[in-house]
Amino acid sequence: MTLVCQFRHSPVRDNDIDFDYLDLESAGLSAPFSIEAFCGSARAGTLTTNHGPLQTPCFTSASNAAGLPELGPDELREVGVQALVVNTAGLSHHLGAAAIAAVSDLHRFLGWGGPIIGTVGSEQIFGLTDSGGVHGRLLGVTEDGVTFADHLDGTRRTMTPESSLAMLEAMGVDFAVPIYRAQLKPSRRTPDPELDRQWAERAMAARSRNDCLLLMGIPIHAIQGPALASFLTSLPGDGYAFAARPVTGLNARSEGPNGRFRHLSDDSGPLGFAQAVQGGFDCISSQAATRAARAGLAFTFAGPVSLADGVSLLDRQPIEPGCPCYTCLNFTWPYLQHLHTAQELLAPRLLAIHNLTFFVTLARRLRTAILEARLDSEVEEIARLYPTSGS
């Protein structure tokens, strides 16, 4: 697999990275997603992007504010995170897409040289109530698009498939997820696959960058079962973005070896992650690692560890012996427990480094298990250590 991105940088200065992208078509790469092996519904593959390849299945960090509270981009690279998922809604509100494009692009703006999956906050927009205060209201959904009062200051905004894609393309993301009817509340879950298909087709028609992979959002609460498989087949684009796991209707083999890329937003724990891979998802973005870190919870391959548990001050062991992360190589469990008890900001930061390393390692293990046709036993072991998908 040939890398499409060349990082011309010195070994010490990350700010020397060349963030410019190379058009995939000019590189002769017409099929960016290659599936290498199946194991049941799960699959291992490689996705080529302008800013490097993604080996799947993979774990990605999710950010609602274009940055993780605990870690910087250099630390994310160090733990092995391959890509970032960035909700651009807040950035576009504060700065505007044109302002970010003028700076150069979102990669340079964030200091991140790897792939970026850009969203416009569809889950948050369609999760708004249609009554109540001025701020954060869903004002209307029509065939044209969605109108809402911004949750930050109440500004009336309208977003269409065309305008949302234009904003993401201007920011230079590698994957764009245009506006779609996500996370519909029970009163709004009337299936309307024709409208969803029209929105996807309009976004596809408005596409101006062939190097930006288009992921079509799936209104998962409204379409299930056989209808979901049929709906997926009818959509244009390079892949799918799921806001939740479907109950039924997803079959990784249904599209053949050149099937489309599947991204899932899911904040469940290690078992939920493993089950998502087992169910046919290629990339799972989650905030579980950092949320657990803020609560003093560490994920290990011997089970969860809480800093609230008592431990001898004479214990010189790290959270997880043998773990290669910065935290485990340099700090003991008693010290981390002290930081957590004292509510020092360093505690969630160090735990986040460890937890992110755990998920990256888990994704690599699952990939190896798929390639070796033993995924079920690997998932069973995770289920033994983490009995519930949310743990």
Image (spheres, rainbow, N blue to C red):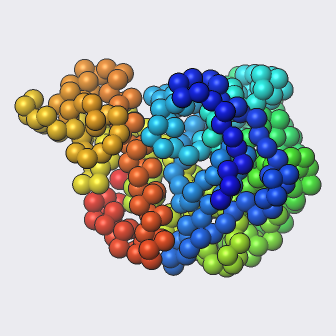
Estimate the x, y position of residue 121 in percent, counting from the top left: 68, 41
- Residue 352 versus residue 42 in the image, above or below: above
Residue 76 seen in render: yes
Picture residue at 47% right of the left edge, 37% below the top: 78
Give 162 or 374, whichever is nearer the viewer: 374
Picture residue at 56% right of the left edge, 59% below the top: 56
Estimate the x, y position of residue 306 in percent, counting from the top left: 24, 41
Classify residue 6 as left or right of residue 75. Answer: right
Classify residue 127 as left or right of residue 370. Answer: right
Q: Quadrant of residue 20?
A: top right
- Residue 35 versus residue 331 in the image, above or below: below
Classify residue 322 as left or right of residue 251. Answer: left
Classify residue 329 as left or right of residue 58. Answer: left
Residue 142 seen in render: no
Estimate the x, y position of residue 133 in percent, counting from the top left: 67, 29
Q: Where, quadrant-wise, is the N terminus in this rendering?
A: bottom right
Estimate the x, y position of residue 110 in percent, counting from the top left: 64, 28
Give 352 or 388, whichever is nearer the viewer: 352
Picture residue at 86% right of the left edge, 40% below the top: 166
Q: Quadrant of residue 294?
A: top left
Q: Quadrant of residue 201?
A: bottom right
Picture residue at 77% right of the left edge, 40% below the top: 21
Q: How many marks?
A: 0
Give 92 or 72, whichever is nearer the viewer: 72
